[in-house]
Image (cartoon, grey):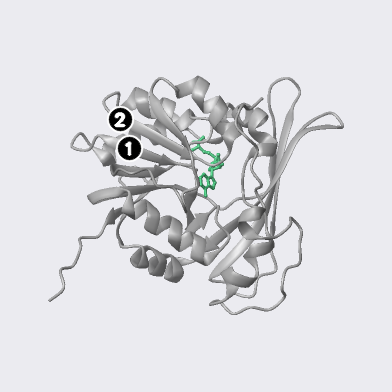
C-alpha cells in the first residue's frame, strides 16, 4: 500500500531482531551494549488497523488538541508534531486552532501514507527519524501527543516514556528537537498512565489486545518493556507488532532534559501535557 521505499530498519543498529543481548551492563553502557541488537520501533505491522483502535477512544484527540492549543497560545504559530502517526491528533489540532502552521514527522512510511490522506492539505508531512531529522528551520512549539515521547504518571511523580531504546539516541533526539525550536520554544509531551495489558472489541468483529512484559533490565532508573499489539478476528491474526519501549524515572528524566537544554514548566492546567521550554543560551565570559 505504500509507495515509499522500504528501508532496512535493522541496519541502523547494526543488529538483527532477536539478536544477541549482552547480559550485564552498567547504566553508563546500557544504551551501547543492550539496545543495539534491537529493532527500531516502527508501526509497519499495525498501520492498517491503527485507526480502528484510535477511533475506539484509545486517545481523546479533541480534548488533547484543545489542551495543547491553550498551552501554545495565540502568540505561537508554527508547530512540529513528533510521531504524527496517521494524523488523528493533527486533525483535531487543526480544528482547535486553524491558524497553526503544522508539520508532522514520523519514520513509519505506512503511517504517513494514511496521514497524507487525512491531513495532507492541512499539514506538511515528513518521513524522518527525530534523532537525525534536519528540517532546516525552527518551530514555536514541538508536541509529542502519544508519539515519540510521553510522560507517564508514576506513583505521585512522573517519568519519561520513549520509543527510543538507547540512552544516546534518546539524548540525541531531545537535543535535535531543541535545535528545531525558536528561543523560548515549547516542548509538550502528553501525559498518560503506564502501559498495561488489556483487550477491546472493535468494529467488524475485530478484537484488539495488548500485552506488556517488563524486560529483565539491570537498572531500574532506565527500564524497558515489550509491548505487543495484536488485532484478531476469531482465530485469525490480522495485524501485530511488538515495540520495545524505554522509561526513565524522574532523576534520569531531569538529567536528560537538562542535558538537552530544556527547562521544565511541569504539568499544564488540563493535566494532559507536560510542558518544557528551550532554555535560554547562557553567554560565556
Ligand atoms: C502511537 S503512534 C502515533 C500517535 C499520534 N501522535 C496520534 O496521536 O495518533 C507513535 C508514532 O511515533 C512514530 N515514531 C516512533 N519513534 C520515532 C522516531 N524515532 N522518529 C520518528 N517517528 C517515530 C511511530 O512511527 C508512530 O507512528
Say which of 249 and 109 sits in front: 109
Q: Are marks 2 and 1 in contact (CB under 8 Å)?
A: yes
Q: Is residue 40 left or right of residue 192?
A: right
Measured from the top left, where is residue 66 in percent x and y? 34, 32
Q: Is residue 179 above or below residue 1?
A: below
Mark 2 Cβ inside 8 Å of ligand 1: no
Give neighbour class at mark 2: few <14, some 14-19, many 20+ (Cα, 10 Å): some
Measured from the top left, where is residue 145 in percent x and y? 45, 41
Q: Is residue 213 left or right of residue 3?
A: right
Image quadrant assignment for residue 199:
top right
Measured from the top left, where is residue 218 in percent x and y? 64, 75
Tell me the residue at 43%/71% (across/down): 251
Question: Could you tell me which secondary element the residue under label 2 belongs to?
Answer: strand
Say which of 120 and 230 sits in front: 120
Question: Could you tell me which secondary element the residue under label 1 belongs to?
Answer: strand
Q: The C terminus is located in which quarter?
A: bottom left
Which residue is label 1 attached to?
79
Which residue is label 2 attached to?
101
Say which of 75 and 275 sits in front: 75
Measured from the top left, where is residue 123 in percent x and y? 39, 27
Amino acid at each position: 500500500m505504500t509507495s515509499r521505499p522500504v528501508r532496512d530498519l535493522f541496519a541502523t543498529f547494526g543488529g538483527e531482531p532477536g539478536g544477541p543481548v549482552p547480559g550485564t551492563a552498567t547504566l553508563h553502557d546500557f544504551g551501547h551494549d543492550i539496545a543495539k541488537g534491537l529493532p527500531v520501533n516502527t508501526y509497519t505491522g499495525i498501520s492498517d488497523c491503527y485507526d480502528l483502535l484510535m477511533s475506539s477512544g484509545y486517545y481523546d484527540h479533541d480534548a488533547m488538541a484543545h489542551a495543547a492549543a491553550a498551552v501554545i497560545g495565540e502568540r505561537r504559530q508554527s508547530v512540529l508534531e513528533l510521531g504524527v502517526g496517521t494524523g488523528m491528533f493533527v486533525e483535531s489540532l487543526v480544528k482547535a486552532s486553524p491558524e497553526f502552521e503544522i508539520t508532522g514527522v514520523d519514520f513509519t512510511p505506512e503511517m504517513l501514507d494514511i496521514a497524507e490522506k487525512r491531513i495532507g492539505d492541512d499539514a506538511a508531512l515528513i518521513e524522518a527519524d527525530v534523532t537525525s531529522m534536519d528540517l532546516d528551520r525552527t518551530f514555536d512549539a514541538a508536541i509529542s501527543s502519544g508519539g515519540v515521547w510521553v510522560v507517564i504518571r508514576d506513583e505521585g511523580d512522573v517519568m519519561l516514556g520513549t520509543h527510543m531504546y538507547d540512552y544516546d539516541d534518546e539524548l540525541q533526539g531531545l537535543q535535535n528537537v531543541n535545535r528545531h525550536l525558536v528561543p523560548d520554544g515549547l516542548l509538550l509531551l502528553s501525559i498518560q498512565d503506564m502501559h498495561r495489558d488489556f483487550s477491546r472489541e472493535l468494529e467488524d468483529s475485530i478484537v484488539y489486545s495488548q500485552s506488556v512484559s517488563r524486560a529483565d533490565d539491570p537498572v531500574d532508573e532506565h527500564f524497558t518493556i515489550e509491548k505487543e499489539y495484536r488485532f484478531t478476528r476469531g482465530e485469525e491474526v490480522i495485524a501485530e507488532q511488538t515495540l520495545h519501549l524505554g522509561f526513565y524515572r524522574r532523576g534520569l528524566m531531569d538529567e536528560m532534559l537538562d542535558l538537552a537544554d530544556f527547562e521544565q514548566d511541569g504539568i499544564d492546567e488540563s493535566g494532559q501535557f507536560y510542558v518544557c521550554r528551550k532554555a535560554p543560551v547562557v553567554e560565556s565570559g
